[in-house]
Image (cartoon, rainbow, N blue to C red):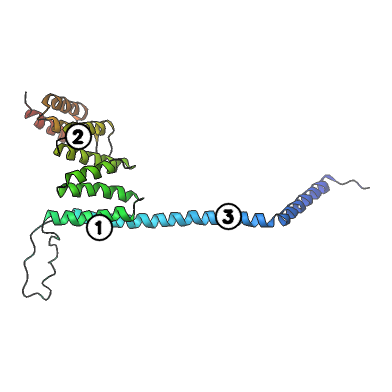
Amino acid sequence: MARLTRHELKEDEFVSTVEAAEDFARQHATQIIAGVLGALIVAGAIVGWRTYSARQEGAANAALGEALKTFKAEVGPAPATNLFSQDATTPPPGAPEFTTDQQKYQAALKQFTEVVAKYPRQTAADFARYHIGLCQADLGNDSAAVSTLEAASGSSDKNTAALASEALAGELNKIGKTDEAIKIYQKLADHPTSTVPRATALLAEANLCRDSKPAQARALYEQVQKEFGTDPYLANQVQQQMAGLPK
């Protein structure tokens, strides 16, 4: 029997490997096809979900934008009726859309509520919930505002949560829960964000303590002066506030 060369042995091993692979494929064709189809289905589901989420996020942001326009709209007297106009019901360009603050905030409240209802899993929902609390406060519904802002302050988005906490502190102070409000400002000062910086929280706490705890207010103003004294605006604000404090 002739001896096989090393090259021939490698070729024989390769052929054997290919044949074994082909045999395996023939014997397990069903399982292989099922596995490939399963992988394609999973990949398609991931792509589909990402596309859906992107569309939902875009729609949520658009709805939030419209609600914010309402929230920030100007309020003014109703435009005078033009007797010579063919359409006397159409306000002139640039005219205020709302004649009272209550009318505006009720409209905004409805829009923000719809954002939360339609897009509860989007980031826009948290920001909308915070504005729902602001609308409720502006409409004089303090108890509802406190409840809503408490929920919004638990947002996973730290910047939205900080804004909601700041607004919540203001509402709590309004209804006489000043000590609770002070604790919130202290927490915000210890965990500053881009929406509620440390200086903002410290000044808010100091302003809250001016009448009931002037010594604590002075200490807080001095703290702001020490940490942020290089900022001309803050330095001027602190000096003005300290000048009016009781001795």
Q: Amino acid at mark 2?
A: Ala
Under tag 2, what secondary structure? helix
| Residue 75 vertical placement versus 175 (above, below) | below
Under tag 3, what secondary structure? helix
Q: Residues within 10 Å of mark 3 (few under 14, many from 20)?
A: few
Please name whichever residue, 193 or 125, is drawn nearer the observer in this view of the structure: 125
Side of 220 relative to 115 (left or right): left
The answer to which image quadrant residue 169 occupies is top left
| Residue 237 vertical placement versus 41 (above, below) | above
Q: Amino acid at mark 1?
A: Glu
- Residue 181 image label: 2
Q: Amino acid at mark 3?
A: Gly
Residue that badge 1 annotates: 66
Q: Residues within 10 Å of mark 1 (few under 14, many from 20)?
A: few
- Where does the image place residue 97, in percent across and percent down from the top left? 15, 61
Label 3 vs 2, first from the N-terminus = 3
Residue that badge 3 annotates: 38
Which residue is at 19% across, 50% downward?
135
Inter-mark Cα distance, 3 to 2: 55 Å
The answer to whether mark 3 and mark 2 are in CB contact below 8 A is no
Side of 28 relative to 113 (left or right): right
Check the image and name the residue furthest to the front.
143
